[in-house]
Image: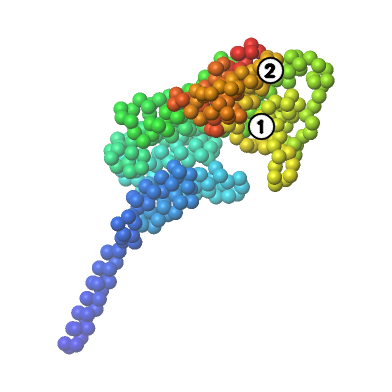
Amino acid sequence: MRDKLIQISLMFATGALFLSGCSTVAPKCTAVEDNPAHHYQVGMQALEDGKVSVAQEKFERALYCDDEFSIAHSGMAIVFAEKVKAQSDTGFKSVEIERVAEELKKAKKQAERPDQNFDYYTAVVRTNTLIKPKDWLNDADDAYKDGVKLSVDERKLSYYLGTEALPYFMGVAWLEGREFQKARDSFSSVLNAKREGKWHEKADKGWKRVDRIVRAMGGITLGDVGKSIAPKEMVSRADLAALIIDELKINKLMAGRIPLASDAAKKAEFTPADMTSHPFKEEVLTLMKWKVRGMETKYDETTHAYLFKPTDPVSRGEMAFILEDVLIKLTGDDKIATAYFGQEKSPFADVKPTSAYYNAVMNMTSRSIMESELSGEFRVNSPVDGAEALLAIRMLKQKINIY
């Protein structure tokens, strides 16, 4: 009897220990910095730095530590949206789009506080902007309107730090959707916030860019090429060729101002191999025909051929050089090409008088065709964006009165 009682007692004790073990789950991540909040923070910064794979790893670790960590799901949705944007294969795109929707659904379901919902609505705006599904701009705007209604304790926004992040990303959405005035208003709302926060500098750049676009597109009738190039962050060689031809009607002008029949009738010496099926082939060949400096072909070491390199970005120095030659050809004033030779001091910190671009930069800035920075730099090596290119061509048209 005594042995039987002992056996029963042991059974009860074992059962109690088993139940106790079931009710207390040991945490998966115990190191000081091995926690969901830390991994989320690093992941979001990696996204900002363009390191998508690193961001995914950090969000995966955050969700390993806590699979109900809402804001990590929001971050993961942005990762998959970035992958959609970078993917050309339709099949892979559809898979990533499904993952975006799944992560957003989890983020919304697991959000318990206003700050977590803020991350969710911001992720909805950002993912729609990246993927651009049907009615994406309306969906982004709906998420924005829901997000601004939240009463958020900004101290709990570990990455975004301030609620002005939401109008900033909505500004980016409006810009991508070519609603330029709305984009300018969104960026302005960030700049008009009571305090200067994390998103002010980005909003300032966004406002300046969209303001240039609005100015570039105002007061003139743009062709289809101009409208498509205006929002671009980087103008390629082919883009600029098409813009010059479309906006300046340079073939007609050149033929009218250079009256020799042989010049007017001549063609480009050859068609570069990388332009044979390019949509801007004729525009490039026209500039090659008139031998516009800066629009020549380049020798390619890999193919051992002279190519146009249509996708190469155009720097501000290169555009000054190209527009200077257009100006010389249209005015017939060859003195422009050497007007600033021999100067000892440059007004620009980043363009020396000995630079190949110096004369062109001086010609463009002295005629207000291109602008320098308040810092005293011309940004000679920076890529030209669409608005800058349009404004420069607009000013060039005014200077030589070809409207």
Q: Residue 58 vs residue 196: left or right?
A: right
The numbered dot on residue 340 is none
Residue 278, picture quadrant: top right
Residue beneath disc 1: 238
Residue at x 53%, y 40% (from the top left corner): 131
Q: Residues within 10 Å of mark 1 (few under 14, many from 20)?
A: many
Query: Percent x, y for residue 40?
Result: 38, 49
Is residue 272 positioned above or below 193 on the image? below
- Horizontal side of residue 274 vs 128, given as left or right: right
Q: Secondary structure at mark 2?
A: helix
Q: How is the image coloured?
A: rainbow
Instruction: Point out residue 35 in the picture as x, y percentages from the top left corner.
Output: 33, 55
Type of amino acid at the residue the image marks with label 2: Asp
Q: Is residue 385 above or below residue 362?
A: below
Where is 313 relative to 303, above or below?
Answer: above
Q: Which residue is mark 2?
A: 334
Say which quadrant the N terminus sits in: bottom left
- Tell whether 217 sits left or right of 112: right
Residue 227 in view (yes/no): no
Asked if one can make out residue 315 in the rendered structure from this viewpoint, the answer is yes
Which image quarter is the C terminus in? Answer: top right
